[in-house]
Image (cartoon, helix red, strand yellow):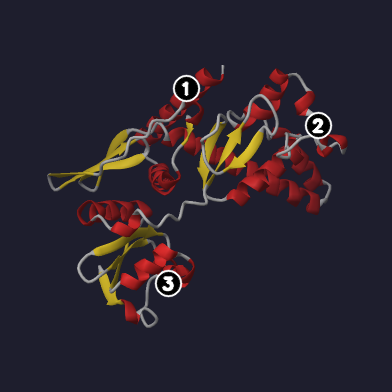
């Protein structure tokens, strides 16, 4: 790893690529992290230190900074886990960049049916976590605009002004089963043809040279498609258990996370904290797991290995069966 004294940070050239970095005190590593941009992540810690007590303490105690570039975030994850297993950096448990992540919380029985929530402590059905709450705000707006799905205020009266202004079909006064199957279930198990009519509508706008309308509709369609892809990721990562070989090394993935590696005949284990999820959390996981789960998932998908992709499809089907058994 390339190392330099903290006092030299303004003069140091730090690459913008993927990699791992450490902040160390006089005798030990204080903090380790992986990143898609070494320069941005390292310098950002120093910029926000004045606004965060834990980061301020970290920066104050730091003597040396080190970094190493990697070809992928998965390689950086492997490196990070190896270092963490031997150094146990104290600030990794204190600095929580995921605290502002959120979930979709679904109520099957009464409004508000779909909410953006901070945790999974109530009796809703939960999906997530999500890194960007504003993505979810835009998603709920798009679903309401495209399909007249519910976008309920937090407080009564219901039906709300959206129904009175013809922006909602009045799901709160419809028969519960109809509301559930037509307006709530698509967030959990989307049908393949949900967007087909909107795609035809886009094609019509485009053919008639109504480019502004076509572009607005296209943006909403892409937003919903992005959510559906993320939903697929959640389905898979909660059931992802496999081993694969690469460059003479064997990797073990358990419950969507990196659990072990064998290289040069030596076995390294990365213990995972087992979390008991309730039935209504079948599509939810802890916020601090998101980064690792996403890195593992994208790496396996991008390998484009037929055997691995077939296994991933099996995990997706398994998840769908589990969800249907809960919902029925």
Q: Is residue 41 left or right of residue 126?
A: left
Mark before the other along the chain sequence, 1 or 2: 2
Q: Which mark is residue 159?
A: 2
The residue to which callout 3 is attached is 46
Give the image location of residue 104, x and y in percent: 58, 38
Residue plotted at (73% across, 34% down): 150
Q: Is residue 172 left or right of residue 16?
A: right
Mark closer to the observer (3, 1): 3
Seen in the picture, residue 75 relative to 162 is either above or below; the reply is below
- Cβ–Cβ under 8 Å for marks 3 and 1: no
Q: Is residue 91 left or right of residue 198?
A: left
Instruction: Specify the quadrant of the image occupied by residue 201.
Output: top right
Mark closer to the observer (1, 2): 2
Give the image location of residue 193, x and y in percent: 66, 29
Mark before the other along the chain sequence, 2 or 3: 3
Mark 1: give few (<14), some (14-19) or many (20+) Cα within 10 Å.
Answer: some
Nearer to me, 12 or 248 = 12
The residue to which callout 1 is attached is 322
């Amino acid at each position: 790893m390339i190392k330099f004294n903290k006092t030299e940070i303004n003069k140091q050239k730090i690459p913008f690529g993927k990699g791992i970095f450490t902040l160390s005190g006089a005798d030990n590593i204080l903090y380790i992290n992986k990143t898609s941009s070494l320069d941005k992540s390292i310098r950002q810690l120093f910029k926000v230190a004045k606004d965060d007590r834990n980061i301020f303490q970290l920066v104050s105690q730091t003597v040396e900074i080190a970094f190493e570039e990697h070809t992928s975030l998965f390689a950086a994850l492997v490196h990070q886990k190896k270092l963490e297993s031997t150094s146990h950096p104290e600030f990794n448990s204190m600095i929580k960049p995921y605290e502002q992540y959120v979930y979709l919380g679904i109520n099957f029985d009464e409004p508000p049916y779909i909410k953006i929530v901070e945790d999974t402590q109530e009796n809703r059905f939960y999906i997530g976590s999500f890194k960007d709450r504003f993505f979810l705000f835009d998603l709920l707006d798009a679903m309401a605009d495209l399909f007249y799905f519910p976008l309920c205020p937090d407080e009564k009266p219901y039906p709300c002004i959206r129904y009175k202004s013809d922006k909602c079909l009045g799901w709160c006064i419809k028969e519960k089963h109809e509301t559930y199957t037509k307006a709530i279930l698509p967030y959990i198990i989307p049908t393949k043809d949900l967007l087909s009519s909107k795609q035809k509508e886009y094609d019509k706008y485009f053919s008639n040279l109504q480019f502004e309308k076509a572009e607005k509709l296209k943006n909403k369609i892409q937003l919903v498609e992005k959510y559906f892809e993320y939903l697929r990721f959640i389905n898979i990562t909660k059931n992802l258990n496999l081993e694969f070989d690469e460059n003479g090394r064997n990797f073990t993935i358990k419950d969507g996370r990196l659990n072990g590696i064998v290289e040069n005949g030596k076995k390294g284990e990365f213990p995972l904290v087992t979390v008991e999820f309730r039935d209504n959390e079948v599509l939810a996981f802890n916020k601090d797991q998101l980064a690792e789960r996403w890195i593992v998932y994208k790496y396996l998908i991008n390998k484009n290995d037929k055997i691995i992709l077939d296994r991933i499809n099996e995990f997706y089907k398994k998840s769908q069966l589990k969800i249907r058994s809960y919902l029925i």
